[in-house]
Amino acid sequence: MKILTFTGATPAEALKKAQREVGEEAMLIETKQIRKKALGSEPLYEIIVGVDDTVPAPAKRSDPYGRSGSASARKQPPLSEQQPLAQKSNDVLFNISEAAKQISKIAEVTDDRPAEAGQGADTEELRQIKKEISKLGDKVKLIQNMFWQERAPELQKAIPPEFAEIYRLSLQSGMKREHLDAIMELTLEHMPVKMRESSESVKRYFQTLLRKMIPVRMERPLATGAKKAIMLVGPTGVGKTTSIAKLAARYSYLLEKRYKVGLIVLDTYRIGAVEQLMQYARMMKLGIETVVDPPEFTSALESLHYCDYILIDTMGSSPYDREKIRKIQACLEADRELSIDVVLVVPSSIKYEDLKETYESFSPLGVDTVMFTKLDETRGFGNIFSLAYETNTPISYFSVGQEVPEDLVVASSEFLIDCLLNGFDRSRV
Ligand SMILES: Nc1nc2c(ncn2[C@@H]2O[C@H](COP(=O)(O)OP(=O)(O)O)[C@@H](O)[C@H]2O)c(=O)[nH]1
Ligand SMILES: [Mg+2]
């Protein structure tokens, strides 16, 4: 059975549309008001009908018991005269479960009979009963699916069955509930009726909508003579240094144009843990400067003036350490020549609320883009979606593993939404 939805300013108008589209043969499932009349907007009614898309059953079947016709072969009244099934559904379910009980009683009795006595008749009777039971099972399933009534707390409308899968997937992805419900509400309101027919087309529509909502920063080739400085900031252990190494390899060796790349390590707390990046610099033969304060920072930028890209690593900032963030800020302010792109690096393996908190602590630095790391260590990607959507900060890169330089992906909304709905798959990187 195919489920179709029609809307109109009155129930009669919605019904007319349905009659034009499917004739009188359909089953009326539900009529409901989905929007009340308000200032500047008409009320909206929706009717849901079911159309049998299988070959119609013959009006009369052969019946070994001489009964005339059967319930399913009886023709239903024309669409305009039907009472909505939703109103009848309780009765229907009650009747079905009563009937099922009675049938199983008969089945028990016949089962208890000795096998020899009247075997032929019993077998035929049992076959019929089994057939009836399986038909009832199908009907119950159909009705249960049609009236899947889970309501999201913030969502005023029930979620139709074709939307159930996509709703569940998004919710499990860790997307902020408010975002999901708002998107769902929009989808229910604006989605073309034709597309609601199957969960597949609903999924495609939803996927496109989500993609359009994610801000992404494209990677563009540098204009001739232009320079770019990129600073990676973020909590300790999120993958900043590893990502700097990946980016350095990318810009100096992996793109069509090979750029001159220089590195700066901002070690404002003199932790001295710069060896990790030093090694990468040696391997890739890149210039590297270690700095501890703003004057050193500006002179390091000057000494790397021959570079197209200057990548700046920052050391050990716990998100709560305001003092360290302030020191980074002082360095950023000391630079008068280049405009430095600040990239916030955060792991995708933490929940949305923690991402948001990290974002807020680093926001005084003026975050230009966000880079999400450790996509290979997480299952849900809705937290990434929600942070990008809520802060409206574009995503620039994803890090999908520890390998330098290959585990880096230039951000794209297709990739993210694919991960969100279908999971991360290394072969699609
Ligand atoms: N699984 C996984 N591990 C990563 C990823 N990025 C970095 N790491 C690992 O995370 C640890 C910390 O990385 P590091 O670059 O030193 O973090 P930093 O403190 O922010 O500079 C290292 O063991 C990295 O190999 C990633 O995308 N996936
Ligand atoms: Mg580091």
Image: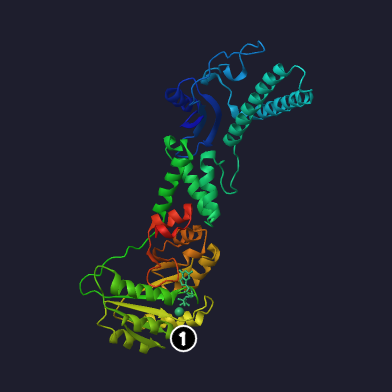
Residue 62 point in image, percent of width and height: 59, 13
| Residue 167 screen position, x and y as percent | 53, 47
| Residue 340 visible at all | no
Whole-percent x and y of residue 217?
A: 35, 63
Which sits in the foreground, 363 or 68?
A: 68
Report if the beta carbon of the residue with label 1 is closer than 8 angstroms to ligand 2.
Answer: yes
- Count every numbered label the image shows and give the total: 1
Q: Specify the quadrant of the image occupied by residue 429.
A: bottom left
Q: Secondary structure at mark 1?
A: loop
Q: Is residue 398 left or right of residue 310?
A: right
What residue do we see at 52% from left, 31% from top? Answer: 48
Quadrant of the rendered image containing residue 224 = bottom left
Mark 1: few, some, or many residues within 10 Å (few <14, many ≥20)? few
From the image, tell me which residue sits under label 1: 273
Regarding residue 242, the answer to whether it shows in the image is: yes
Depth order, front residue of 297/380: 380
Comparing 10 with 300, the one in front is: 300
Image quadrant where residue 116 sits: top right
- Locate residue 200, reporting x and y percent: 46, 41
User: At x 54% / y 77%, what residue is drawn?
Assistant: 320
User: Is residue 5 positioned above or below 364 on the image?
Assistant: above
Residue at screen point 45% across, 24% down: 22
Residue at the front extreme of this rendering: 116
Q: Is residue 207 above or below residue 146?
A: below
Residue type at mark 1?
Ala
In this view, which residue lies farthest toward the left? 224
